[in-house]
Every structure is written in structure tokens, then in C-alpha cells.
Image (tube, grey):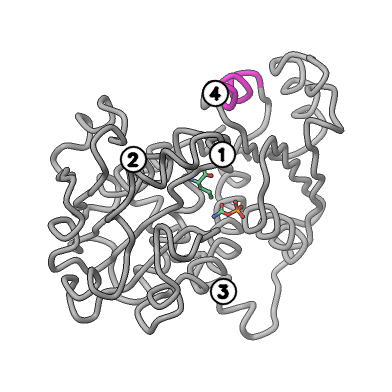
């Protein structure tokens, strides 16, 4: 049985064939065709945190392929009243075929997976967001025809999205320059593990020079609302605006996992501008995750 807790859980070859399948599934939707590959299958979504894209893409995706989804928030489940993760995992995984979890502490999802009889998908933790990177890589490939041998610039917080891009650089074979304010660096262990692909700076115009792909994320992730003022100050100068974008290569694309906060990490002009592919990127969550669920369920047979 396989889980998808990090991009490292799949080999580079498996990731590429997953992107192939995602493109096929996208094409089927465009033609109004839906295969029924997930008929009779149930996906449980256990979400501790808010979500629009992740929840809707999982629910719509399961529905399109003939499966069923049930959504549980802690307020509704006994886990919110203190039932241990281990017990919850044993019980839920005895009844459904696959589980996707969105939670803060990364350890929660590891603990769940250790006690689960079915595949577990990471739908975001404070450490990483691998489902997002499947969609992001799919979008990159739609534009450049490849996912390797590209220059990526990540401007902003050394957070879960930054970590995910670093791991993607290793798995997909591209180079990434990361610009973060001092004190907001990604985790040191991960940085060391990815050092052959990652360059760090605290100067956004350095990171973005000649980039093919420019990425940012919110300065205030879920759970950091109390730090809003302090973070807004610390990230001054890190807004991806048209002037900064001029340093990227001429055919560069702009990506953002969304939700975006215009005027903070990105200006409205860039987000809505001709280089932005954020809406394709968001749609690709649907296709990439359908391919992921098929893959994990096939591996379990
Ligand atoms: N990008 C992303 O995961 O969005 P949601 O928080 O809306 O799911
Ligand atoms: N870094 C953001 C990503 C949201 C999809 C957060 O964790 O809130």
C-alpha cells in the first residue's frame, strides 16, 4: 500500500506518468466524457482547516469518476472531542477506500497513516502541500512541454509551499532560487537535503533573474493570523509586481496556489496579467488528484 504524504513517496517516473494520466483525464472532461474508474469507491476528507480548491477538487473529482466523498471536520467528528488519531484512523480506514487529510502538525498525518489500512493523501500540513505541486507541475508542463531543466523563482515565505517546491525541484529535476526575508527561511534539514537544486537569497530581484516560473504564496498562512502585522512588515519589498517580473525571462509564467492577497504577496496586475496561469493551475488540482487517487487505489490491489 502506498501513501502520498510527500512528493518523495512517488518515484520521478511515477510522478511523470501521473501527470500523463492527469492530462488524459483533463482531455476527457473537455470532451464531456467521464470514465467510471472509481465506481463504488469512497474517499473520506478529514479537514482541520479551511479549504476551497482542495475540498472541491477532491469532491468533484470523485463524483466525476463514479466515486463518493464524505467530508468530516473536527467539529463533527469525535477526534474534535479527543478521540486519538490512531483510533480514528483504524475505524475510518476500515470503512472507506482512501483518506485525504488537511491538518496543521505534519506528525498528525504520519500518525494517521501508520494506523491506516488504506492510502492516505496529504491535503496540506504546516510542512508541505504535495497535491498542489502535482497541479503546479502539470501547469508548468502545459506551458513548457517539460518539468525539468527550467528555472523557478520562489519569492516569499519559507513555508509549506516553499518546502513543496524544494522537494519538487529534486523530484522533477529543475533549479529553484528562493528569496525569503531573513528569519523566514525554509527548514534547515530540508534545505540541506535539496541543496543541489536550491539557491537561497534575501533579494527578490536576484532570485527572479531569468526565471521561467515565478511563484509566491501568502505571507500569512492558516494559523498565523496573530502575526499579521509583524509579517506584513517583514515581507515589505517581497511583493511580486510588474517591475520585479521584468527581471524574469520574457515568456515566464506566474503561479500561486491561491488564495491570493492582492497588494501583499502579489499585485492585482500580475495576478490578472498575461503571464499569470493561476486559474489553469487551480483547475489542474481536479485532474491531477483524480490521477493520484486512481494511482493509489491501483497500487493497493
Ligand atoms: N491551494 C489550496 O490548497 O487552496 P485551498 O486552501 O482553497 O484548498
Ligand atoms: N501557505 C498557505 C497555503 C494555502 C493553500 C497556508 O498554509 O495557509
* Mark pair 2, 4: CA separation: 22 Å
Residue at 35% across / 69% down in the picture?
Answer: 254
Which residue is more in the foreground, 278 or 241? Answer: 241
State yes or no: residue 113 in magenta: yes
* Mark pair 4, 3: CA separation: 31 Å
* Mark pair 3, 1: CA separation: 36 Å
Residue that badge 2 annotates: 158
Q: Nearer the viewer, mark 3 or mark 1?
A: 1
Q: Nearer the viewer, mark 4 or mark 1?
A: 1
Task: Tell me the number on the disc at residue 110.
Answer: 4
Task: Tell me the number on the disc at residue 225.
Answer: 1
- Whether the residue carrying mark 3 lies under 8 Å from ligand 1 is answered with no
Image: magenta residue range: 107-115
Residue that badge 3 annotates: 26
Q: Is 214 left or right of 282, judged from the image as shown?
A: left
Q: Earlier in the sequence, mark 4 or mark 3?
A: 3
Main structural element of the magenta stretch: helix, strand or loop? Answer: helix
Element type where label 4 sits in the image: helix
Amino acid at each position: 500500500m502506498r501513501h502520498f504524504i510527500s512528493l518523495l513517496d512517488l518515484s520521478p517516473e511515477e510522478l511523470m506518468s501521473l501527470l500523463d494520466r492527469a492530462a488524459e483525464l483533463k482531455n476527457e472532461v473537455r470532451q464531456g466524457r467521464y470514465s467510471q474508474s472509481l465506481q463504488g469507491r469512497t474517499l473520506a476528507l478529514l479537514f482541520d482547516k479551511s479549504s476551497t480548491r482542495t475540498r472541491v477538487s477532491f469532491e468533484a473529482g470523485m463524483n466525476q469518476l463514479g466515486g463518493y466523498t464524505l467530508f468530516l471536520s473536527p467539529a463533527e467528528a469525535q477526534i474534535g472531542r479527543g478521540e486519538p488519531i490512531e483510533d480514528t484512523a483504524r475505524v475510518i480506514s476500515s470503512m472507506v477506500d482512501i483518506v485525504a487529510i488537511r491538518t496543521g502538525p505534519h506528525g498528525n498525518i504520519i500518525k494517521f497513516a501508520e494506523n491506516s489500512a488504506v492510502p492516505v493523501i496529504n491535503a496540506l500540513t504546516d510542512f508541505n502541500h504535495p497535491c498542489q505541486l502535482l497541479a503546479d507541475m502539470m501547469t508548468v508542463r502545459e506551458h513548457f512541454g517539460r518539468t525539468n531543466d527550467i528555472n523557478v523563482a520562489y519569492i516569499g515565505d519559507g513555508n509549506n509551499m516553499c518546502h513543496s517546491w524544494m522537494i519538487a525541484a529534486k523530484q522533477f529535476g529543475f533549479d529553484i532560487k528562493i528569496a525569503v526575508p531573513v528569519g523566514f527561511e525554509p527548514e534547515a534539514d530540508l534545505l540541506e537535503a535539496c541543496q543541489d537544486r536550491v539557491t537561497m537569497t534575501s533579494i527578490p530581484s536576484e532570485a527572479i533573474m531569468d526565471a521561467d516560473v515565478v511563484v509566491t504564496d501568502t505571507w500569512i498562512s492558516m494559523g498565523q493570523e496573530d502575526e499579521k502585522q509583524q509579517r506584513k512588515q517583514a515581507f515589505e519589498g517581497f511583493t511580486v509586481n510588474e517591475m520585479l517580473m521584468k527581471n524574469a525571462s520574457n515568456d515566464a509564467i506566474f503561479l500561486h496556489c491561491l488564495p491570493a492577497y492582492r497588494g501583499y504577496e502579489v499585485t492585482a496586475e500580475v495576478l490578472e496579467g498575461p503571464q499569470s496561469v493561476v486559474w489553469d493551475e487551480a483547475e489542474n488540482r481536479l485532474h491531477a488528484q483524480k490521477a493520484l487517487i486512481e494511482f493509489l487505489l491501483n497500487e493497493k490491489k
